[in-house]
Image (cartoon, grey):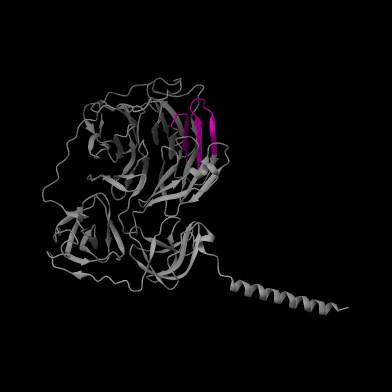
């Protein structure tokens, strides 16, 4: 028999040999292709090669191959970088470790369907800007004939923002953004580079370069010496409902309505309006301010507004989508339903009043008017309007920005800092939580009329759309589109205070502020900006925005008034001041 010592030695030698054999085999087996690691595109970049960010938004550089990695830099559109390592397929994105402008980290080549960067061939020619005379410009036919003049003012020709760069080149770093409300001053004669005439301009104290146009299209234009005429304002027409409304619940008034004091004919600015909402039949437009809620008759906007007899100042208001007489209201600690016909809070057997003991940030109804929901600083609740029963009980969360019931009543969407949470209304236990990759801090959200998508806005004016149909099948929520307005801290960004879909779901409107109170209109399918409104002296904040039930009008609240636009050309048709 062998001694125990010899047996141990033989076992040790056997194990060492086995480990070495496994390592040798592993070295001979090539790594799994990226496609086997997840649902990513086929990589086009190569290690030790170079890549370039395609036109559009900048690419973020993170300290890890994950959307949760900290951002350590960014590569602007046209920026060329060195490829150091990769790829990795993580979270549906194709990641490479890169180096750009002295910063190393991970950036994405693309998602499951689109490439964000492209490989740079070794023989790609380097763009050399050429200085041209003030009236010479680029060769004829390659760009529009120059129209700007040094010392004059200019503006955009349309509603799409233009980039302000630190050099006359598409590879120049973006240092700002020209918005439709901006006016710039031309500083120097043009530089021809890459088929563009580049002009050095001053935009709100920031000097940079912007392109005048391409082909036959102008991006910017000189401002005429004559003043732009003020559009004629016409009275708002009487609304005609476009759909049959479901009758609302039977109401039992508990408070006798006390008419407000008849105001005089002297109009004065509104005192800090915060929210605006249309009744289901379009007859009423309700406006909340820091002190009161005003009710305007849209068929007779020249008449004084009626002041609703509420228990105290309202934080947010929203009409029921089915009953023109029911108004949802929140104040600092409560949410309740108010009947504008009787002038009373709905009470008796129905008790849709709930004490949340914190300021309110969200208010919503389902499309059938059956469920009514609200949120406080860290609690949400949903009530059945017909029975007064709690459909989804109050629950503690972290600090909330906003929440909305989906129109079909299937879920509640909740914005929480950099996260989107979907909580199903049935079962009280199903949650879907996704980190929003491009958002710095979410400030507003809206749910599409068909309850399939959620749009979110942040403190930089960025928008993102998410597909939430996966919540029905226990799948992840899917990121769909992003509109990234601000590339860096010097860009002219705006805080998104409110978002809403048009009744048919084709458009999204935003109310924004800082530095200017403006309203933007986007297509919901592509997030293409189609219009910007708001060039009023003294405006700094647009607080809320709402489409009329037929989609023909758009009302928004600003610092001292409510403005109503028609939605065919987005021209002003009415301004609502307060008459005392």
Residue 271 visible here: no
Q: Residue furthest right?
A: 1
Q: Quadrant of residue 365?
A: top left
Quarter occupied by the N terminus: bottom right
Q: Is residue 338 magenta?
A: no
**287 or 563: nearer the eye?**
563
**17 or 373: nearer the eye?**
17
The spot of residue 516 in percent (x, y) is: 28, 48
Q: Is residue 379 magenta?
A: yes
Q: Residue at the location (44% across, 57% down)?
A: 111
Residue 155 in the figure: left or right of residue 354: left
The spot of residue 575 in percent (x, y) is: 24, 35
Residue 29 in the figure: left or right of residue 306: right
Residue 578 visible here: yes
Position above or below: 65 against 560: below
Quarter occupied by the C terminus: top left
The spot of residue 464 in percent (x, y) is: 40, 49
Q: Quadrant of residue 98?
A: bottom left
Residue 186 in the figure: left or right of residue 97: left
**313 or 432: nearer the eye?**
432
The residue range painted magenta reads 367-394
Position above or below: 580 against 361: above
The spot of residue 497 in percent (x, y) is: 36, 44
């Amino acid at each position: 028999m062998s001694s125990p010592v010899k047996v141990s030695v033989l076992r040790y030698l056997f194990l060492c040999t086995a480990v070495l054999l496994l390592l040798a085999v592993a070295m001979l087996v090539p790594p799994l292709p990226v496609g086997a690691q997840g649902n990513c595109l086929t990589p086009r970049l190569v290690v030790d090669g170079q890549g370039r960010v395609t036109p559009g938004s900048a690419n973020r550089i993170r300290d890890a191959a994950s959307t949760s990695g900290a951002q350590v830099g960014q590569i602007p559109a046209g920026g060329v970088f060195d490829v150091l390592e990769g790829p990795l397929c993580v979270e549906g994105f194709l990641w490479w470790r890169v180096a750009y402008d002295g910063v190393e980290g991970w950036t994405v080549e693309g998602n499951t369907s689109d490439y964000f960067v492209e490989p740079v061939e070794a023989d790609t020619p380097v763009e050399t800007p050429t200085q041209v005379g003030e009236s010479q410009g680029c060769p004829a036919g390659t760009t529009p004939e120059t129209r700007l003049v040094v010392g004059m003012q200019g503006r955009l020709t349309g509603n799409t923002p233009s980039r302000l760069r630190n050099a006359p080149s598409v590879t120049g770093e973006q240092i700002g953004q020209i918005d439709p409300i901006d006016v710039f001053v031309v500083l120097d004669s043009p530089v021809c580079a890459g088929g563009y005439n580049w002009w050095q301009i001053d935009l709100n104290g920031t000097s940079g370069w912007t392109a005048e146009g391409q082909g036959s299209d102008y991006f910017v234009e000189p401002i005429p010496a004559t003043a732009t005429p003020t559009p004629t304002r016409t009275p708002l027409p009487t609304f005609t409902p476009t759909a049959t409304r479901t009758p609302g619940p039977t109401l039992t008034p508990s408070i006798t309505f006390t008419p407000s004091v008849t105001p005089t004919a002297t109009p004065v600015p509104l005192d800090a309006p915060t929210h605006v909402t249309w009744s289901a039949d379009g007859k009423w437009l309700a406006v909340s301010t820091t002190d009161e809620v005003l009710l305007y008759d849209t068929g007779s906007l020249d008449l004084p507004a009626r002041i609703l007899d509420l228990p105290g100042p309202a934080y947010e208001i929203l009409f029921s989508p089915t009953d023109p007489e029911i108004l949802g209201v929140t104040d600092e600690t409560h949410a309740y339903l108010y009947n504008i016909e009787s002038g009373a809070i709905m009470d008796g057997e129905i008790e849709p009043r709930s004490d949340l003991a914190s300021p309110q940030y969200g208010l919503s109804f389902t499309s059938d008017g059956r469920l009514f929901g609200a949120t406080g600083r860290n609690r949400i609740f949903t009530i059945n309007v017909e029975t007064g029963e709690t459909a989804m009980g109050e629950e503690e969360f972290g600090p909330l920005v906003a929440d909305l019931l989906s129109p079909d009543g299937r879920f509640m969407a909740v914005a929480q800092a950099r996260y989107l949470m979907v909580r199903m209304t049935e079962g009280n236990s199903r949650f879907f939580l996704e980190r929003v990759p491009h958002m710095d801090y979410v400030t507003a959200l809206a749910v599409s009329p068909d309850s399939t998508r959620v749009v979110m806005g942040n403190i930089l004016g960025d928008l993102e759309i998410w597909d939430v149909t996966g919540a029905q099948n226990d799948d992840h929520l899917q990121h769909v589109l992003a509109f990234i307005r601000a590339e860096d801290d010097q860009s002219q960004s705006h805080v998104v205070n409110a978002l809403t879909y048009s009744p048919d779901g084709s458009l999204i409107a935003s109310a924004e502020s800082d530095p200017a109170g403006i309203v933007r209109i986007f297509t919901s399918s592509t997030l293409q900006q189609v219009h910007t409104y708001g060039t009023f002296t003294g405006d700094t904040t647009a607080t809320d925005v709402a489409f009329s039930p037929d989609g023909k009008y758009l009302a928004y609240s600003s610092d001292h008034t409510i403005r109503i636009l028609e939605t065919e050309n987005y021209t002003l048709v009415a301004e609502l001041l307060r008459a005392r």
